[in-house]
Image (cartoon, helix red, strand yellow):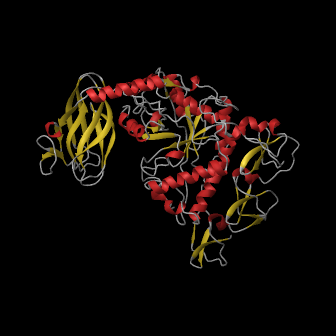
Amino acid sequence: MKTLNIVFTILSLIISVLSKKVYYEAEDGKLDGITVYKDLSGFSGTGYVGRFENPGNSITVTVNAPSTGMYDLSIIYCANMGQKINTLMVNGQSAGDVTFTENKKFESKDVGAIYLNKGKNTIGLVASWGWMWVDAFVINDAPNAAKDVTSKLSSSLVNPKAIPAARKLYDFLKSNYGKRILSGQVGAAGKAGDEGQEFQRIKNASGKLPAVWNMDFIFESNDCTWRPENPDITEMAINWWKKYEGKGIMAAQWHWNIAGKTGNFAFYSKDTTFSLENAVTKGTWEYEKIIKDIDRVSGHIKKLQAVNMPLIWRPLHENNGDWFWWGNNPKACAKLWKILYERMVNYHGLNNLIWLWNGNNDEYTPVDYIDIIGVDIYANDHGPQTTAFNTHFDFYGGKKMVVLSENGRIPDIQQCVDQDAWWGYFQTWNSEFILQESYHTNAQLKEYFNHEIVMNMDELPSFNVSSYNGDSSNTGSSGSNSNSGNSSSSKCWSTEFGFPCCKGNTIVFTDENGDWGVENNNWCGINSGSTTVSCWSEALGYPCCEGNVVITSDENGDWGVENNDWCGINSGSTTVSCWSEALGYPCCEGNVVITSDENGDWGVENNDWCGILN
């Protein structure tokens, strides 16, 4: 490997020394809706072009390439009217959006490598945001050396206690990165491991099933009034895991539904009044609310860990946009990401997660808490999206694997190979994006899923392992933990799954492996002979209630509220308190109804909302 790295370095140095920059002046290109200007200083040639006032306005230049390959491209621009985003076109095909940072004079923007054929090619810029100036397009006069995508890749997961199954999965992805592209597909919302119409279309067209499947905790926050039951989403995932004997990869996102003090719950920012800034501030009711939601979802994921199932975990996805309540605030979102990580990993002991970041690349990006980088692209064609790949690859210095965590159209696999756009996997969104011929023909699905570079489910090993000594093994992993106070720890069955033995005998949860307890905020195994059953809510990250006041009930059991936190009630409790306490509001002393919603009747007392009992 070291020899190969040296070869790449030498080739890159030779090319950088021998290559010359070739300038293609914008004013000499084909102009659509824009004109030539000479007012600003510092331009090259005889002028520059602008202003891209309307969407679709464009500049196109014709360039000559001495041979087929990847060429570094830079654009000399001025964005003195603010930061702008416009679309790069190469040979009539979108190569992705380019962000032009606001400046006051003409500067060079390094776009990255683009794929050019031998001879004449066209390079252009099409306005989406517009309102900027372009002076010239600049390429090297020789193609680049092959891209090295693996030598700097992080050798291990960010969680040193990752269970063997998670480490094996990461090593598998890492070992195939730059050689194979895994296939992926999103199923129906709120389901896991379903083989509905999306998967049937792929199977009918290609004879294959995708390597990467998907689940969404969209209905699992506390505010949701409906969620799948019998089976619930975790049971679906476990059934899938058992059916394929661990020979599958599951990824998950969380469309986090949540409500503010007024209005309905939602994950779209336009539909909820919930405040991200307040949510990451300790002591606020918003902070307490997100902790309860994280705890609930953690309870689900603990069940996956209990059956040794790793999960590629993608919370707070697309946080670079403003459409979700957690987006458009890089600093606060990064803080929320760290809260998620600390609560799920260090408090709940979730060591089966591979953390995928899908959003902002900036000074706030929590790099030390990220395993994989995801990019979501809904393009109008099947281009390889090389510009987007290079942008993310370069930001992380090649240390993080880059995947298409969502795509509309599957990128042309051969073009990905030719242009060194080594997406770790693609994952097509559900519904029309995979079902309609306008997005994918049967011929395309057959070609892409049967391409020699693409890896499908039938080539996967089983990731259901209780021990693993591969590249990312760690002597400090949870699987090697000993329980100094338990003389029988070496005989405890749970150590095979990376969990210690319980010192006590309080049973919280039972599955086909045995009896589980919770100690020190982590799962542990109970050998035998234990009959004491603790409160069921501890398995979901909540304490037991000391009292028996029932606030609400769900498929798990009866819930109460004590010390401003949810707690579980074992059985036999019939006293019902005011339902509004579960939403953070007191009970009304009177019965004057101000408004009503799906929760019940609301009043106002002491300048605050309160709930009225029926």
Q: Nearer the viewer, residue 573 or 26?
A: 26
- The residue located at (46%, 27%) in the rendering is 178
Q: How many marks?
A: 0
Q: Toward which corner of the image does residue 379 lie, by quadrant?
A: top left
- The residue located at (82%, 59%) in the rendering is 572
Q: Nearer the viewer, residue 566 or 171?
A: 171
Residue at the far right in the pictured view: 529
194 to the left or right of 522? left
Horizontal and vertical percent for residue 241? 66, 33
- The residue located at (51%, 49%) in the rendering is 316
**In the rendered image, is residue 34 in sight?**
no
- The residue located at (50%, 59%) in the rendering is 276
309 to the left or right of 434? right
**In the rendered image, is residue 431 in sight?**
yes
Q: Toward which corner of the image does residue 124 lie, by quadrant?
A: top left
411 to the left or right of 587? left
Question: Where the C terminus falls, by quadrant?
Answer: bottom right
Horizontal and vertical percent for residue 58? 22, 41
Horizontal and vertical percent for residue 522? 71, 48
Horizontal and vertical percent for residue 583? 62, 64
